[in-house]
Image: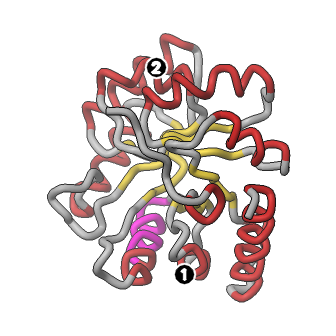
Amino acid sequence: MSVETNLARVRADLAAAARAAEREPAAVTLIAVSKTHSADTVGEAIAAGQRHFGENRVQEAAEKWPALKRQWPDLTLHLIGPLQTNKVSEAVRLCDAIHALDRVKLADKLAAEMSAQGRRLSCFIQVNTGREPQKAGVDPHDLAALVTHSRDICRLNVVGLMCIPPLTEDPAIHFAFLRELARRNGLTQLSMGMSGDADVAIAFGATHVRIGTAIFGARQPQAA
């Protein structure tokens, strides 16, 4: 099926999930995750009205998005993958939202670059709700301190929290946990839910869902 057809189905499914949770469908932002897919493929989604996109890697975003954003200035690009400090300058230049803030050093670097470039990006703090050692994200016990540092000292525009549940666990447990962490820290936005569990995430209050495969199909092979 075409990207347009897939996108229409995903939108319908998300709207149904929102209504089932007694929420307004417009309260959920669909981020179309376009990692590994070409600019032409992304263009199909843009032609179908999609305006929020997500990339995992700054390098791929740099290759693909400057031209796309020149052609369609109303696009919003979300960086949803781990962010190294040596990529922060480029990330701030290219992106409009960061979903990968997870440590003090990164908060400091983001604040310095946003000040230098005169940009103010929305930031989601990524929480490692499953405490998986191989996964990015701040430990839940350290979250409050990072929120305070990022929001009150660095003056970053911290809007919410993000998580990626462990593959082997019920995502509902992690979505409920993230919602409670957001409540405790006075944050209102939740970036959670992907192609396989977006409906569950919406039931637990997701404001941003990150969906790639259901829209674009299987990931394309990446060059080494």
According to the picture, the residue beneath numbered tag 1 turns out to be 200
Q: What residue type is labelled 2?
A: Glu
- Identify whether 135 is placed above or below 194: above
- Location of residue 152 in the rendering, given as x and y in whole percent from the top left corner: 41, 38
Q: Quadrant of the C terminus?
A: top left
- Location of residue 106 in the rendering, given as x and y in whole percent from the top left corner: 31, 32
Q: In which quarter of the image is the N terminus?
A: bottom right
Instruction: Give the secondary structure at mark 2.
Output: helix
Residue 185: within the magenta? yes
Q: Residue at x 46, y 32 (%)?
A: 155
Q: Which residue is drawn at 72% across and 77% down?
A: 13
Do the numbered discs 2 and 1 sit on residues whose CB atoms are within 8 Å? no
| Along the viewing direction, whichever of 223 and 138 lies nearer the viewer | 223
Label whose residue precedes the other's in the sequence (2 or 1) = 2
Residue 142: within the magenta? no
Instruction: Residue at the far bottom: name it.
Output: 20
| Along the viewing direction, whichever of 26 and 31 lies nearer the viewer | 31
Instruction: Give the secondary structure at mark 1.
Output: helix
The segment highlighted magenta reads: 177-186
Q: Residue 90 carries which label?
A: 2
Do we see residue 188 in this rendering? no
Mark 1, other Cα within 10 Å: few <14 / some 14–19 / many ≥20: many
Considering the whole magenta stretch, tell me its main secondary structure: helix
Which quadrant of the view contains residue 176? bottom left
